[in-house]
Image (spheres, rainbow, N blue to C red):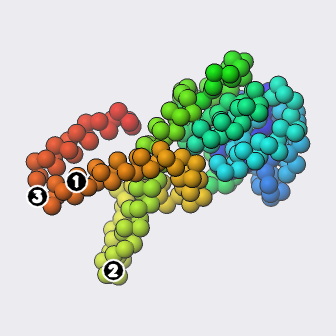
């Protein structure tokens, strides 16, 4: 199958590596000629160009640009595609994207691979990035079954775990487990940097180990992605942040009251339910 990838960063580059390993012919498009050259050299694509018309021959196109560029990129792309081409995206917010694109392109299905790394760019692309990771598809009532089947088959070839839900359900769910953690983690880093004693701050930076590495990772990632999450999933994220603030206030109150029994009960409850989210 001829598969197009528009946007050759971490996700697009990793997607290309896996698709080529499955025997697909991969066509890549990027804004920079240097990225195109690297993508070919790294084996992410068979052909690459800054000219979007390269994707005319693609049977399926994955839009792998930052969230804010997905819709304008789609608008440029469709001038070069026959109407039977299946288009999907990898954006971490679905409702505004599906609402904008689905009425204009019958064979569109929203998608979101729940996989990533701290590093970005084509150089960060790795094989098997999506293996055993959730991959969410958000078809609507009017999405053709044939288009859904095509994307499902590709997702399964990636070794990902396939899920379906509505765009709105997707955005509420990821606000809890993806977008909220980015903001909480970013606040953690900022809070640490507010230490006014330079000696204490230096010690904290030297003492930081696996615990801080784990909890600060997503907050220290791509700033552009964090802003896009907040901008395009604003209401769901605000709801999650407000609930998080409420829970944090409760913990503060327990510590102020020296209510160690209630604090332990809360931490025990957290310990018990965490495996329901991650192994």
Mark positioned earlier in the residue sequence (2 or 1): 2
- Report whether 210 appears left or right of 64: left
Q: What residue lies at 54% left-to-right and 27% top-to-bottom? A: 165
Label 3 element class: loop
Q: CA distance from mark 1 to mark 3?
A: 10 Å
The residue under label 3 is 258
* Residue 82 shows up from this direction: yes
Q: Position of residue 231 (x, y in %)?
A: 57, 53
Say the numbered circle drawn on residue 196.
2
Quarter location, residue 128: top right
Picture quarter with the N terminus: top right
Q: What residue lies at 39% left-to-right and 72% top-to-bottom? A: 193
Mark positioned earlier in the residue sequence (2 or 3): 2
Mark positioned earlier in the residue sequence (1 or 3): 1
User: In the displayed image of the protein, which residue is found farthest to the bottom?
Assistant: 198
Label 2 element class: loop
The residue under label 1 is 251
Disc 2, disc 3: CB below 8 Å?
no
Q: Position of residue 138 (x, y in %)?
A: 60, 29
Q: In this rendering, is residue 252 above or below 11?
A: below
- Report whether 59 appears left or right of 215: right
Quarter location, residue 245: bottom left
- Say few, some or many: other residues with alpha carbon within 10 Å of mark 2 (under 14 / 14 to 19 / 20 or more): few
Q: CA distance from mark 2 to mark 3?
A: 26 Å
Frontmost residue, 222 versus 28 = 222
User: In the displayed image of the protein, which residue is found farthest to the top?
Assistant: 145
Label 1 element class: helix
Q: CA distance from mark 2 to mark 1?
A: 24 Å
């Amino acid at each position: 199958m001829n598969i197009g990838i528009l946007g050759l960063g971490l996700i697009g580059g990793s997607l290309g590596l896996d698709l080529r390993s499955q025997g697909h012919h991969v066509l890549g498009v990027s804004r920079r000629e240097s990225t195109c050259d690297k993508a070919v050299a790294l084996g992410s694509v068979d052909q690459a160009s800054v000219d979007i018309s390269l994707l005319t021959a693609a049977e399926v196109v994955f839009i792998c640009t930052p969230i804010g560029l997905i819709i304008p990129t789609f608008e440029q792309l469709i001038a070069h595609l026959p109407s039977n081409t299946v288009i999907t995206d990898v954006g971490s917010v679905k409702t505004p994207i599906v609402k904008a694109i689905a009425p204009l392109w019958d064979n569109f299905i929203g998608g979101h691979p729940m996989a990533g790394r701290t590093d970005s760019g084509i150089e960060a692309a790795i094989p098997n990035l999506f293996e055993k990771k959730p991959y969410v598809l958000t078809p609507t009532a009017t999405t053709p079954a044939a288009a859904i089947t095509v994307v499902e088959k590709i997702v399964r070839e990636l070794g990902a775990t396939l899920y379906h839900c509505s765009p709105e359900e997707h955005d509420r769910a990821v606000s809890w487990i993806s977008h909220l953690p980015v903001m909480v983690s970013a606040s953690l880093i900022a809070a640490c940097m507010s230490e006014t004693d330079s000696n204490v701050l230096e010690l904290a930076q030297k003492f930081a180990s696996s615990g801080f590495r784990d909890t600060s990772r997503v907050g220290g990632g791509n700033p552009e992605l964090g802003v896009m999450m907040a901008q395009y999933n604003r209401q769901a994220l605000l709801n999650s942040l407000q609930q998080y603030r409420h829970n944090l206030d409760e913990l503060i109150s327990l510590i102020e009251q020296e209510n160690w029994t209630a604090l332990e009960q809360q931490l025990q409850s957290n310990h018990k339910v965490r495996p329901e989210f991650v192994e």
